[in-house]
Image (cartoon, coloured by chain):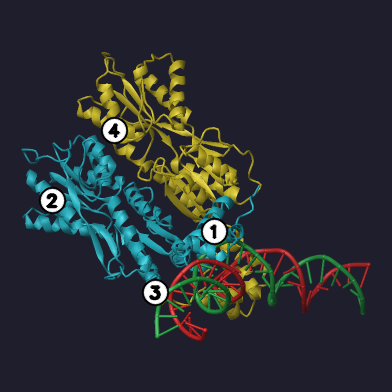
Chain colours: A cyan, B yellow, C red, D green
Amino acid sequence: MALKTVRIQDVAQAARVSTATVSRALSTPEKLSEETRKAVFDAIRSTGYRVNHAARNLRMQRTGAVLILVPNLSNPFFSQILAGISGVFMETDYSVLIADTHGRAADDNRLGDYALTRVDGIISLDGALPAETMQEVAGQGAADRMIFACEWVQDTPLPSVRSDNVEGARLAIRHLHGLGHRNIAHITGPEDNVLTHARRQGMLEERTRLNLPARDDWIIRGDFSLESGREAAHRILTMDQRPTAVFCCSDQVAFGLISTLTAHGVRVPQDLSVVGFDDIELSEYYVPALTTIRQFRRKLGARAARLLLDRLGGGPATPVPGEVLTVEVELVIRDSTAPPPPLAP
Amino acid sequence: MALKTVRIQDVAQAARVSTATVSRALSTPEKLSEETRKAVFDAIRSTGYRVNHAARNLRMQRTGAVLILVPNLSNPFFSQILAGISGVFMETDYSVLIADTHGRAADDNRLGDYALTRVDGIISLDGALPAETMQEVAGQGAADRMIFACEWVQDTPLPSVRSDNVEGARLAIRHLHGLGHRNIAHITGPEDNVLTHARRQGMLEERTRLNLPARDDWIIRGDFSLESGREAAHRILTMDQRPTAVFCCSDQVAFGLISTLTAHGVRVPQDLSVVGFDDIELSEYYVPALTTIRQFRRKLGARAARLLLDRLGGGPATPVPGEVLTVEVELVIRDSTAPPPPLAP
DNA sequence: CACCCGCATGAAATCGTTTACATGTTCACG
DNA sequence: CGTGAACATGTAAACGATTTCATGCGGGTG
């Protein structure tokens, strides 16, 4: 049953050459004579040889794999990024490992273990890695084999690829302002998240620039989730002075918000406008179709993948250590925003 | 910079034992004397030793990884399944590789290559693998290291874990019938998909049992996507005799459908009821909240993972080769279904 | 004609584990 | 007191590739 495993040795025998030659045929075919090369490839075909990665990796002192750290695999936001990453690595001989960090489940040494022995490089979509983990990684020479995508860790020298979050927030506010809104609320992400800060900052900047009124309770703490959108809705419903528009830190939050507002008789966009962030596939098909800030997630993933690939290649393509690649965002206007109702409460 | 890699040999030296003992301390600590065990673990700590997986895998003739084949990574439906799978393997020393098959992009030998050299086992969420690929896998002795989850391939001896699709469809129809609907349409998945067949079959069975009218154009071809829901909506809008309810093969299709119907003035559920399938997170937050058939995706993933784990362990836990584990489904009633409008067209 | 260089190839060391087998010690039992 | 089982540990042979270094050959050059 278990077919006898065919080794490089067997190929060598069949081709009447040495194992070294077979190995060379695979890695640097141009260095062989036409004749030998053909013989080897014929032998490979006829024996059905497939390289044993464990052996190769052992000898080459590498693992042939990269690890993607995802904060939450069940969040559809990440799937396109993964698709982008995986698309790039598919072309290489790297395997892609995916691990869910579950918010914080990166048990102490778990990441360290992976970083140091199981993979050649890491792309973290999680900007909330414990400081000690970061220390460890940085210290152990894994520093130039790890990058961030989407999220990042503040004050770390690791490169990162990210959307222009500040600009995205500005676009959202500007759009609402253009429609005539003045009283604009914002539902943020979790306080310890970098995206939360960037987007809130953009929002605040633009609000100041446009001279819009600021009320403390118009900044509502959320956590990117549907559920937190629902909670924010309840908060808004009980406000003495309601905003006429809400800028959400994610599309999911926007959905949670709209769904709950609608259930309570507040119509979007007639009574209240909502802008999301991300532009996940569903946003176009929500009711109402969601006005949102589009992130080019697939592109972002692909960029990150290539960046890591460059670093792993050890090529000279390693300019600034702390480089930041910014991916543009764009405002997508759909049906969840409209001018504010004529008679403000 | 590159810390000199510490080998098992170094640990052995530090602990004044042989490498064999160190190895044993790691794999079968109970076989060592208290004293030695302690010495070894101290040495491991002090040297900062971490096992080299390539070496271990080479020696043990395994890869330490499993592969998950996903038809489409960007579909949020799969993320929870992945989370379930990955949760189980997290507890083991297996790594989880994830590959997007892109519908059919499993280039000829690509899967074969992986199956045979890079991973110990495979969970395919893709039931549309090319026949030749299946042949190859089956022939090469990978047969007892591969299982299906969610989808499956007809007439293959490989085990699979799946939701009770037929029952799900029955539940949906029964629910609509109970509300008073008689004219029920169904949007299917792609014709070559096993889920399409199972769900349509359940639907047809129940329709027959309940003596509901059948019209050919009430079975509309779709493909699980948002876009196909939109297309189906257009189809329905132009029908001379419209159904009063539609059972969709996925939540995404339902969203596409509802979104487009709403845009054309058809109200859900007042004018037309819609039932989905899957119960993805968003369904609860859609407007209207979607009545749907819930699949326990995380559980399904976890089951599949454990099933594969059993088989890999080589344990006796390998009963019937073609076994099928069925995961129950349940009807979740929300706001997208209601009694049909009083005056039928 | 002697020399050297470049080229294609082969022999063998090496990567870091696990594990079959050998060794030595202890202890129970007749 | 001799024998052997049970146990703890060590020795060394794999696992299957890559790569350094050596070798032999042919041809251009002075």
Label 3 residue SS? helix
Q: Amino acid at mark 2?
A: Ile
Bin the neighbour count of mark 2 within 10 Å (Cα to Cα): few under 14, some 14-19, many 20 and up.
many
Mark 3 or 1, nearer chain start: 1
- In space, the residues marked 3 and 1 are separated at their CA atoms by 32 Å
Q: Are marks 3 and 1 on the same chain?
A: yes
Image point (61%, 55%), residue name: A5
How far apart, in angstroms, are the residues tagged by discs 4 and 2?
A: 29 Å
- Are labels 4 and 3 on one chain? no
* Whole-percent x, y for residue B80 in the image: 41, 45
The residue positioned 33% from the left and 37% from the top of the image is B283
Instruction: Kindly identify which numbered label has been placed on residue A173.
Output: 2
Q: Are marks 3 and 2 in contact (CB under 8 Å)?
A: no
> Which of the numbered marks, if any, corresponds to residue A52?
1
Foreground pick, A234 / B295: B295
Eyeballing the image, is B339 above or below B97? above
Q: Earlier in the sequence, mark 3 or mark 2?
A: 3
Mark closer to the observer (1, 2): 1
For the residues bearing labels 4 and 3, Cβ distance under 8 angstroms: no
Would you identify the image quadrant in which residue A52 lies? bottom right
Query: Which labelled disc corresponds to residue A139?
Result: 3
As helix, strand or loop, the secondary structure at mark 4 comes to helix
The subunit letter for the residue under badge 2 reads: A
Question: Residue under circle 4?
Answer: B256
Q: Is A131 located above or below residue B213 in the figure?
A: below
